[in-house]
Every structure is written in C-alpha cells, then in structure tokens.
Image (cartoon, grey):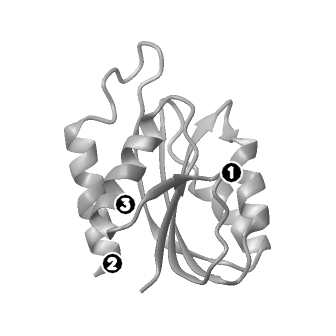
C-alpha cells in the first residue's frame, strides 16, 4: 500500500500530529509544499483552522491533486473550531477524490487556549487512529 502524509502548520501543532502519523505509517511527513506526484492509496492530509477556514496553502495543494490519490484521511488541530473535515471534504469532492469518513482532530494550543496541546495523550491517540486506518 502506498501511503503519504502531507500537512500545513503555522504553529507546529499539526506538524506534531503529522510526524506521529507518519511514524506509524512508516513514511516521512512532508509539508504541502512537496507535491504528490505518484499514485497514492492513502493520503493523510493535515490542516488547521485559521480565521474560521483552512489555510489557502491547503486549498492550493488540494487543487494539484488528481485521481492518482485513491483516498484522503483528514487530520487536524484547532483551538476553537471543531475540525477542518467539512471544508477539506468539499474541496476534495470537487476533485472527485474519496475522503474517509473517519478523521482525527484534537485541540491545538493558541495563545492561552489549550496550552500544551497537542500533548502526549493527543499524539498517542493520533498514532492509534493511524493504526486503525491502516488496519
């Protein structure tokens, strides 16, 4: 199975999750600046909520994807909103790329909100989630 992990992170919260997921999947976590140019069975795509929406870098990355990507698994962190799943799913549906109904989301620290997150418990849960996805 061909697996890839891509993410965008301004504060490092989503990067922590991406690295945990990549470790379990046995691949390297790379930013969305690294294009996905090969057939991929599962793409773990990480983002966060900035100003009530996903960052334009995520939108630009999704625009480069093709049906070579068989399925995307969303993961995210955010201090206030619940997740990026709805926004990311809509963008991927427009590209006719399947999105797994399961996602991983945890709180991310921002200023004084949720200080220390993602923490060790969040990272452990992300690793467990990845094992479940990979079966």
Picture coordinates of residue 6, whole percent (x, y): 54, 57
Picture coordinates of residue 38, whole percent (x, y): 62, 79
Closer to the camera in the image, 76 or 24:
24
Picture coordinates of residue 23, whole percent (x, y): 30, 59
Residue at left 41%, top 26%? Answer: 109
Look at the numbered disc 2 and give the secondary structure of its residue: helix
For the N terminus, the image quarter is bottom left
Q: Along the polypeptide, which appears first: circle 1 or circle 2?
A: 1
Closer to the camera in the image, 14 or 91:
14
Residue 22 marker: 3
Q: Residue furthest top?
A: 112
Q: In this rendering, would 53 be left or right of 108? A: right
Instruction: Judge the density around disc 3: few (<14), some (14-19), many (≥20) Cα neighbours within 10 Å.
Output: many
Which residue, given by chain and number where applicable, does mark 1 sit on? 58
Q: Along the polypeptide, which appears first: circle 2 or circle 3?
A: 3
Look at the numbered disc 1 and give the secondary structure of its residue: helix
- Whether tag 2 and tag 3 are in contact, CB under 8 A, the answer is no
Residue at left 55%, top 78%? Answer: 71
Give the foreground label among 2 and 3: 3
Picture coordinates of residue 13, whole percent (x, y): 43, 35
Look at the numbered disc 3 and give the secondary structure of its residue: helix
Q: In this rendering, would 72 be left or right of 33? A: left
Instruction: Judge the density around disc 2: few (<14), some (14-19), many (≥20) Cα neighbours within 10 Å.
Output: few
Marks 3/1: CA–CA distance: 18 Å
Marks 2/3: CA–CA distance: 12 Å
Which residue, given by chain and number where applicable, does mark 2 sit on? 134
For the C terminus, the image quarter is bottom left
Query: Residue 92 lies in what quarter of the image?
Result: bottom right
- Whether tag 1 and tag 2 are in contact, CB under 8 A, the answer is no
- Whether tag 3 and tag 1 are in contact, CB under 8 A, the answer is no
Residue at left 66%, top 51%? Answer: 33
Instruction: Judge the density around disc 1: few (<14), some (14-19), many (≥20) Cα neighbours within 10 Å.
Output: many
């Amino acid at each position: 199975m061909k697996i890839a992990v891509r993410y965008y992170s301004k504060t490092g919260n989503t990067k922590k999750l991406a690295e945990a997921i990549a470790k379990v999947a046995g691949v390297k976590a790379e930013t969305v600046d690294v294009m996905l140019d090969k057939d991929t069975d599962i793409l773990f795509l990480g983002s966060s909520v900035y100003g009530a929406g996903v960052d334009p870098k995520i939108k630009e990355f999704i625009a480069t994807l093709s049906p070579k990507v068989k399925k995307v698994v969303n993961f995210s962190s955010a201090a206030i909103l619940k997740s990026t799943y709805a926004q990311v799913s809509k963008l991927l549906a427009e590209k006719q790329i399947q999105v797994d109904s399961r996602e991983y989301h945890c709180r991310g620290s921002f200023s004084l909100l949720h200080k220390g997150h993602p923490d060790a418990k969040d990272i452990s849960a992300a690793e467990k989630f990845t094992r479940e996805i990979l079966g």
